[in-house]
Amino acid sequence: MSEAVESDVDAVDRVERVDTAGAVDTVDTADAAAETSEAEQHEDQRSGADLLVREGDIAGDYLEQLLDLLDYDGDIDLDVEASRAIVSIEGGEDLDKLVGTRGAVLEALQELTRLAVQQETGTRSRLMLDIAGWRAGRREELRDLGRATAERVLSSGERVRLQPMTPFERKVVHDAVASVKGVHSESEGEDPKRRVVVFLDS
């Protein structure tokens, strides 16, 4: 083989080695970036979960002090569901007083609890408070109402306006209506008179 040919072969070999090394470096860099991104995502998830657990603990302490002050019996249960801290109080008959008419006292107490949590964490809380199973029972009633209203609109073709509701109640109704094909719902008005309106799809 001539020197010129050998030189060309060496040059090609060097280029191939450089290209291969470069490709390996690129793959290694991409893998490292993916691993870092995945690790950061897991860390964010852990941080979010830890914050929700902390919110529940703070809320539990706050509500326990309130129950002691009122001399009410109640067992406090903490949970995390759908990226939200859930605090439930079950116990004696006195707890009905903390629910109030249509959950008015419960809504106010939930807001106070959220503020107490925010004061400790510096973050606005979406914590949900239930007392004596009122929200759970009300949720089932509202689901039935939402589905029944949707069927009524399908039959009549006319929109239906429901009574004013709290944000919690409206969301449950919206979700129930969304499960029925051919209709949709919107909220109208301003709190505390904001309500759900169900329409036939155009």
Image (tube, grey):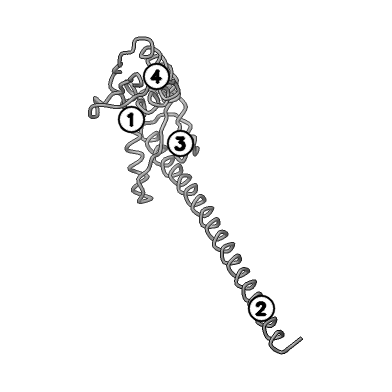
Label of residue 12 in the image? 2
Specify few, some or many for label 1: CA neighbours under 10 Å numbering under 14, 14-19, or 20 or more: some
Q: Position of residue 189 (x, y in %)?
A: 23, 27
From the viewer's perspective, tell me whether residue 201 is left or right of residue 88: left
Placement of the N terminus among the 4 image quadrants = bottom right
Instruction: Report the mark closest to the observer, 3 or 2.
Output: 2
Which residue is label 1 attached to?
167
- How far apart in space, not on screen, are marks 1 and 2 (Cα)? 70 Å
Q: Position of residue 188 (x, y in %)?
A: 26, 26
Instruction: Report the mark closest to the observer, 1 or 3.
Output: 1
- How far apart in space, not on screen, are marks 4 and 2 (Cα)? 73 Å
Instruction: Report the mark closest to the observer, 1 or 2.
Output: 2
- Under tag 4, what secondary structure? helix
Which residue is label 3 attached to?
86
- Under tag 3, what secondary structure? strand
- How far apart in space, not on screen, are marks 1 and 3 (Cα)? 16 Å
From the viewer's perspective, tell me whether residue 56 is left or right of residue 187: right
Q: Which amino acid does label 4 sit on?
A: Gly
Image: 29 above or below 39: below
Q: Which amino acid does label 1 sit on?
A: Pro
Instruction: Report the mark closest to the observer, 1 or 4.
Output: 4
Image: 122 above or below 11: above
Q: Which amino acid does label 2 sit on?
A: Val
Which residue is label 4 attached to?
146
